[in-house]
Image (cartoon, helix red, strand yellow):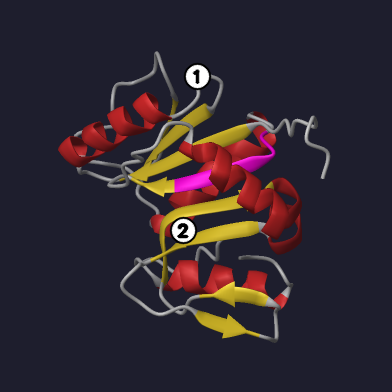
Amino acid sequence: NNPGMEIVMKIGIGISTYGRRDVFNESFEAVLKNSRPETAIVVSDDGSIEGPPFIYEVAMVLENENGGIARNKNRLLANLFMQQNVDVAILLEDDVRPTAKNWEDTWGLTALINGASFWAHGDFPCVHSGLYSRITNNYTTGQCIAISKEAFWQVGYIDPRFTRYGFEHAEWQNRMAKMGIGG
């Protein structure tokens, strides 16, 4: 409530990728174009046959053997929170293309306020959940997720037992909601 007060937070963007080099390149360019220069960017390649993208001069690249989506995103979370020491980690799929300048500020602030934010598909209805006192959506996805360091330490990693896309994000969000995290 102090108009002169500035919120300072360190934001990190983690991009998970596997195999879709052309899709990744377009998305990566959009992230660079629309994000602040001081925002940490880490890319985790999950064992793509063609190898990881060659972008070492502008982003940290983690090269891994294929271990599934949950493990790949967990590598990003570990790097962003424990090595980059960010206050908020934003996880992006390799086909997400931010279109607004400094887009990560809004996602970061929302994560600081609510603990976490999941992108909800605009074509599906929102559901109000009195149990958690939050507005939630049954159709959130893993395309864009922001989580604060504090919430991460409470809820932990994405469950690596899920090896296919979709269920790991829903389980992680449900775990957060049960703890009162998310919005």
Query: What's the amino acid at mark 1?
Result: Pro
Q: Which residue is mark 1?
A: 37
Name the side, left or right, on which 34 lies relative to 41. Answer: left
Residue in the image at 61% along x and 65% along y: 183
Residue in the image at 22% along x and 43% along y: 19
Badge 1: how crowded within 10 Å, few (<14), some, or many (20+)?
few
Q: Which mark is residue 70?
A: 2
**Closest to the observer: 39 or 123?**
123
Residue in the image at 56% along x and 20% along y: 38
Tell me if residue 18 comes above or below residue 122 in the rendering.
above
Q: Which tag, 1 or 2, sits closer to the chain's start?
A: 1
Q: Is residue 160 magenta?
A: no
Residue in the image at 80% along x and 32% along y: 5
Q: Mark 2 and mark 1 in contact (Cβ < 8 Å)?
A: no
Q: Quadrant of the N terminus?
A: top right
**Closest to the observer: 133 or 178?**
133
Tell me if residue 160 comes above or below residue 144 in the rendering.
below
Residue that lies at the very extreme toward the left in this rendered image: 22
Name the side, left or right, on which 123 lies relative to 62. Answer: left
Tell me if residue 100 comes above or below residue 54 in the rendering.
below
Query: What's the amino acid at mark 2?
Result: Ala
Name the side, left or right, on which 90 lies relative to 151. Answer: left
Q: Which mark is residue 5?
A: none
Badge 2: how crowded within 10 Å, few (<14), some, or many (20+)?
many
Which residues are drawn in magenta? 86-91
**Circle 1 or circle 2, nearest the eye:** 1
